[in-house]
């Protein structure tokens, strides 16, 4: 009985948090990636800004976008789940 309980718990955790492939346990594997999002603006090779969330300077009119790390870390914005993720459509 105890083995079955642990197995059920493990399967639920795997479905919720990770993908198991070739013996690897990868957290967040099923979550969308900012780099693949329509709203992603690449600023460096490793990071970027989110075009979906920003603030307009009322003097200059320049829009400052928030960092993708902040967008994904904030539950009320995009959150870890990627609530506003829209897949980029690649031109062929």
Image (tube, rainbow, N blue to C red):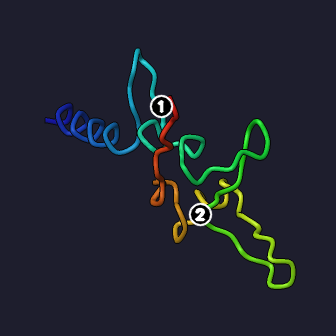
Image point 45% across, 22% down: which residue?
24
Q: How far apart are marks 2 and 1 (CA)?
A: 28 Å
* Tag of residue 26: 1
x, y percent for residue 27: 48, 37
* Tag of residue 87: none
Left or right: 13 with respect to 56?
left
Instruction: Judge whether 73 appears above or below 64 on screen.
Output: above
Image point 21% across, 38% down: which residue?
8
* Tag of residue 52: 2
- How many marks the image carries: the answer is 2
Residue nearer the viewer, 4 or 54: 54
Which quarter of the figure has residue 44?
A: top right
Image point 71% across, 63% down: which residue?
66
Image point 52% across, 71% down: which residue?
76
Left or right: 67 with respect to 71?
right
Which quarter of the figure has residue 39?
A: bottom right
In the picture as drawn, the residue positioned furthest to the bottom comes out as 58
x, y percent for residue 60: 86, 78
Quick one: label 2, few (<14), some, or many (20+) residues within 10 Å?
some
x, y percent for residue 92: 50, 28
Residue nearer the viewer, 26 or 60: 60
Left or right: 75 with respect to 2?
right
Which element carries disc 1, helix, strand or loop?
Answer: strand
Quick one: label 1, few (<14), some, or many (20+) residues within 10 Å?
few
Instruction: Judge whether 22 appears above or below 10 on screen.
Output: above
CB under 8 Å between callouts 2 and 1?
no
Which quarter of the figure has residue 57?
A: bottom right
| Disc nearer the start of the sequence (2/1) | 1
In the picture as drawn, the residue positioned furthest to the right comes out as 60
């Amino acid at each position: 009985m105890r083995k079955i309980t642990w197995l059920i718990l493990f399967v639920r955790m795997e479905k919720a948090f990770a993908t198991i492939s070739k013996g690897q346990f990868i957290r967040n594997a099923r979550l969308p990636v900012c780099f693949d999002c329509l709203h992603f603006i690449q600023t460096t090779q490793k990071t970027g800004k989110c075009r979906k969330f920003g603030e307009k300077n009322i003097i200059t009119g320049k829009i400052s976008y928030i960092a993708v790390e902040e967008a994904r870390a904030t539950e009320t914005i995009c959150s870890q789940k990627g609530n506003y993720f829209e897949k980029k459509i690649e031109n062929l």
